[in-house]
């Protein structure tokens, strides 16, 4: 068994940069390669809409209500025709019905999904997609609010529903409501996810910190275990634009100069270390640190396309953690003594 240990994110990122130089590849999520198709060019982020004429009576005149009304309008405005036209020239694509989760709190997400999926009229999308931004910042939000974009709020557990573990609840809610509305086991996507959404200085501060890279990796591992088929981070945006989502790459519209953020390099690591089967780690998730495991299945693509690995995340600023883990491989069992350095992401690859 061959292992490579990265004791800090800096060393891991350096390796990822070297790999990227040798094997150029576009920024992409490591999960399902299924395609989604824009359903209406006027609303970025929406996927293919499909269904019958909906009724919008009773939709409240709120931000969430207006978003819902727009989605219902996509259903009424030719989404099904668009899907059929694409199938005629590119059969076999997975059509994702998306941007369904502007409200992802426990009561709001289920109701929003029901309001839309119940109007599909027998149409079967290949995937159902929602969004999830764990923290957000709108003008007037108090810094003590659990959803405020502060480093102390980027947590795996606690802080109300504003934690990484809550992505599992989103996955189970989407799956449950798809079944409840007679959909035939569609894939489930996070069409967008991230720490926070808004165009404010505090959001930018979070987006440009190492903590967001740690969040990205831990959210991906949690989402993968919860059954998400694809998780997509917003790719490119200009922070000076009034319509802005914190992205993997900051792009200056005026000069065209790109600046990758820390979370971008997590995808480079996944490109070369992604295992497609999650393995549970007993007692592997604690308040300050986590250990995840993944393996490449024998039935998957060639072995070179994905490696088995342990991912070590230490969220503390100054506490070193040492753990002993027993791993089993085709060549037998072995005990590994792992050191999780403060505020780091490390990989042990097999």
Image: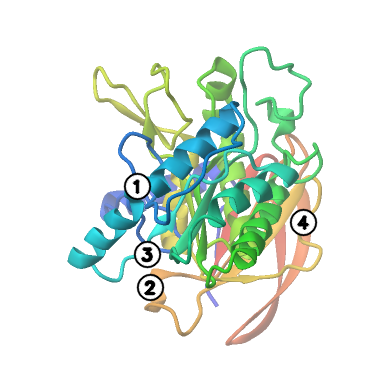
* Res 153 → quadrant: top right
Q: CA distance from mark 3 to mark 4?
A: 34 Å
Residue denoted by label 3? 94
- Seen as rendered, the residue at the extreme top is 140
Label 1: how many residues lie within 10 Å, few (<14), some (14-19) or many (20+)? many
Q: CA distance from mark 4 to mark 1?
A: 39 Å
Name the N-terminal-most of marks 4 and 2.
Answer: 4
Name the N-terminal-most of marks 4 and 1.
Answer: 1
One can see residue 46 in this view? no
Residue denoted by label 1? 39
Residue shown at 44%/59% (left/top)? 30
- Residue 138 shows which numbered tag? none
Mark 4, secondary structure of its residue: loop
Residue shown at 78%/60% (left/top)? 323
31 relative to 219 in the view: left or right? left
Residue 318 lies, with reference to residue 33, above or below; the image says: above
Q: Position of residue 41 (x, y in %)?
A: 30, 38
């Amino acid at each position: 068994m061959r292992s490579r240990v990265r004791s800090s994110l800096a060393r891991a990122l350096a390796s990822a940069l070297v790999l990227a130089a040798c094997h150029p590849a576009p920024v992409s999520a490591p999960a399902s390669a299924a395609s989604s198709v824009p359903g209406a060019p006027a609303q970025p982020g929406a996927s293919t809409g499909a269904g019958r004429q909906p009724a919008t009576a009773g939709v409240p005149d709120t931000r969430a209500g207006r978003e819902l009304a727009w989605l219902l309008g996509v259903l009424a405005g030719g989404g099904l025709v668009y899907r059929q036209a694409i199938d005629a020239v590119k059969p076999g694509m997975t059509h994702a019905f998306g941007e369904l989760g502007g409200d992802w709190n426990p009561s709001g997400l289920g109701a929003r999904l029901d309001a839309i999926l119940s109007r599909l009229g027998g149409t079967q999308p290949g995937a159902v997609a929602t969004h999830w931004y764990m923290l957000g910042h709108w003008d007037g939000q108090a810094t003590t609010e659990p959803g405020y974009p502060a480093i102390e709020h980027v947590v795996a557990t606690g802080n109300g529903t504003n934690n990484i573990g809550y992505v599992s609840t989103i996955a189970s809610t989407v799956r449950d409501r798809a079944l409840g509305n007679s959909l035939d086991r569609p894939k489930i996507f996070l069409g967008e996810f991230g720490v926070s959404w808004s165009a404010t200085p505090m959001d930018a501060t979070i987006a440009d910190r190492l903590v967001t890279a740690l969040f990205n990796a831990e959210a991906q591992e949690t989402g993968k275990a919860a059954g998400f088929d694809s998780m997509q981070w917003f790719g490119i945006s200009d922070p000076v634009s009034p319509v802005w989502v914190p992205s993997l790459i900051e792009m200056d519209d005026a000069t065209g100069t790109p600046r990758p953020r820390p979370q971008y390099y997590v995808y480079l690591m996944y490109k070369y270390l992604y295992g497609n089967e999650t393995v549970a780690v007993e007692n592997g998730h604690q308040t300050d640190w986590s250990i995840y495991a993944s393996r490449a299945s024998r039935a998957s693509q060639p072995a070179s396309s994905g490696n088995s690995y342990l991912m070590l995340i230490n969220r503390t600023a100054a506490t070193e953690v040492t753990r002993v883990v027993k791993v089993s491989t085709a060549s037998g069992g072995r005990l590994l003594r792992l050191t999780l350095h403060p505020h780091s992401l490390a990989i042990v690859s097999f």
